[in-house]
Image (cartoon, rainbow, N blue to C red):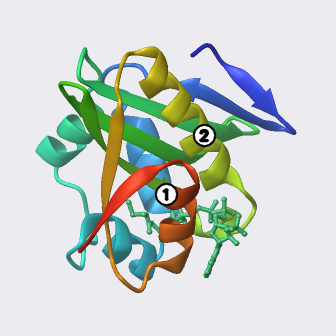
Amino acid sequence: MNSEQVDRVTIRPLRNRETAVVQAVFDHLGARSRHLRFGDAKNVLTASELEQLARVDGDHHMLVAVFDGGPIGIACLVRDGVSAEVAVEVADEWQGRRVGTILMERLAADARAAGIEYLHAHVAAHNAASRALMRRSAVRISLA
Ligand SMILES: CC(C)(COP(=O)(O)OP(=O)(O)OC[C@H]1O[C@@H](n2cnc3c(N)ncnc32)[C@H](O)[C@@H]1OP(=O)(O)O)[C@@H](O)C(=O)NCCC(=O)NCCS
């Protein structure tokens, strides 16, 4: 997709190795959000984790939501043939304001345009917000 404006939030593709963007969103996730997104109790991203998370190539695609120059959310997919695993995170202070929904809608549209037929995600059973969001974007959920 090209860059798109929704209200005052811009959604744009992440460029390869924009590690500062990934770090900025991570810095605005509280402990619960980090746990829901990354599984373990994660307080820091190592340089190699950042590099991996900010990787964009034929199989790795990411969208970032930006408000007033600052990144506030990220949605990513890793492609494997006609399917892809997706994940999404929104800065704590922005959660519940539909940023996640917009990111996932656009990511799912990009996936369809690229010929991806199935999306799936690992989501904690108690993560009601993510389950609602994924279901609406037709993402198959495996309970983590
Ligand atoms: C999951 C997450 C991405 C959702 O993004 P968001 O911008 O807060 O979500 P939205 O405002 O677009 O709302 C999405 C849905 O979740 C619901 N929701 C939002 N916050 C909720 C909460 N705390 N409890 C239950 N449902 C909630 C909304 O009502 C909405 O459902 P609806 O459209 O049926 O009403 C965000 O909460 C987040 O980053 N969480 C931490 C990381 C995470 O869990 N990632 C997912 C694992 S891959």
Label 1 beta carbon within 8 A of ligand 1: yes
Q: Amino acid at mark 2?
A: Glu
Label 2 beta carbon within 8 A of ligand 1: no
Q: Amino acid at mark 1?
A: Met
**In what element is the residue under mark 1?**
helix
- Identify the disc placed on residue 11: none
Tell me where residue 104 sits by quadrant: top right
**Quadrant of the picture in which ligand 1 is shown:** bottom right
**In what element is the residue under mark 2?**
helix
Residue lying furthest right in this view? 7
Question: In this rendering, would 49 be left or right of 119?
Answer: left
Residue occupying the point 32% across, 56% down: 121
Q: Is residue 55 above or below residue 30?
A: above
Instruction: Name the quarter where the N terminus is drawn.
Output: top right
Tell me where residue 15 sits by quadrant: top left
User: Which residue bears the numbered disc 2?
Assistant: 105
Image location of residue 94, percent across then percent down: 68, 62
User: Which residue bears the numbered disc 1?
Assistant: 134
Quick one: 1 or 81, which is closer to the camera?
Answer: 81
The disc, 2 or 1, on the residue closer to the chain's N-terminal end is 2
Image location of residue 7, percent across then percent down: 87, 39
